[in-house]
Amino acid sequence: MKVSALWNKRRVRFVNSKTPSRLLIKQADAARDAQKFREAAALYVAALKLVPNRGDLHVQAGNMFKDAGDFQQADCHYRKAEEMMPGSAEVAIQFGHLCKASGRLADAVRFYERALALEPGWVVPDNELKNMRKAGFRMKDESMVPAASDRPARGVRGRVFDPKLPGMFGRL
């Protein structure tokens, strides 16, 4: 094959790979890596408008909203991903992380257990469950019950600590 023919094939493939959705996803990935979570979430949502049937992009958008502290938007995207990818252990563990970050520990345990059931032997949900037990939580009838010492933390001026606050400034 001639060099010019190879070049033309490569050029066509390069042009076709630069679809608007791929460019948005690449920009979203870069924003995610720079820990610009709100910007990354907006870019993933923009990409989803062009390719709405991508459950993996809903998971990524959910992750970015969760990391930005917008738990309601994260929940919406994880639910959409669950509709598109039923029985996905990845979606289950992301729901677990969301529940844990938002303080719904009993739900987090259920989702971690579901992820383990969907993908037996997966280390990540197993470690999450072990770490929650080490932190002082005990299991009772398939739900997490906080230990007696786990009362709401008080701030400097006696105000109850808002667990959502750290999530607004980066990863938990």
Image (cartoon, rainbow, N blue to C red):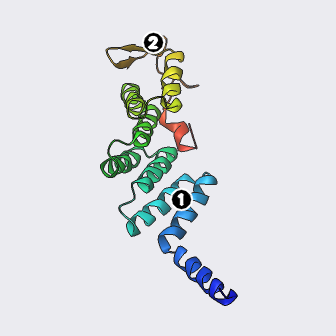
Indicate left or right for 80 with 62 as reference.
left
Residue 153 appears in the figure: no
Question: Can you give x and y, in whole percent of width and height, for residue 121 in the image?
Answer: 48, 28
Q: Type of residue at label 1?
A: Glu
Task: Determine whether 122 is above or below 167 in the image.
Answer: above
Q: Position of residue 94 (x, y in %)?
A: 44, 40
Is residue 152 in sight in this rendering? yes
Mark 1 Cα-neighbour bin, 10 Å: few <14, some 14–19, many ≥20: some
Say if 109 sits above or below 54 in the image.
above
- The answer to whether 6 is drawn above or below residue 158 in the figure is below
Residue 4 lies, in percent from the top left, at: 67, 89
Secondary element under disc 2, as helix, strand or loop, is loop
Q: Look at mark 2 in the image and give the residue it sits on.
A: 147
Q: Which residue is mark 1?
A: 39
Question: Mark 1: which secondary structure?
Answer: helix
Of 49 and 83, which appears nearest the observer? 83
Residue at point 32%, 45% (across, down): 86
In front here: 23 or 4? 4
Position of residue 66 in the picture relative to residue 7 (left or right): left
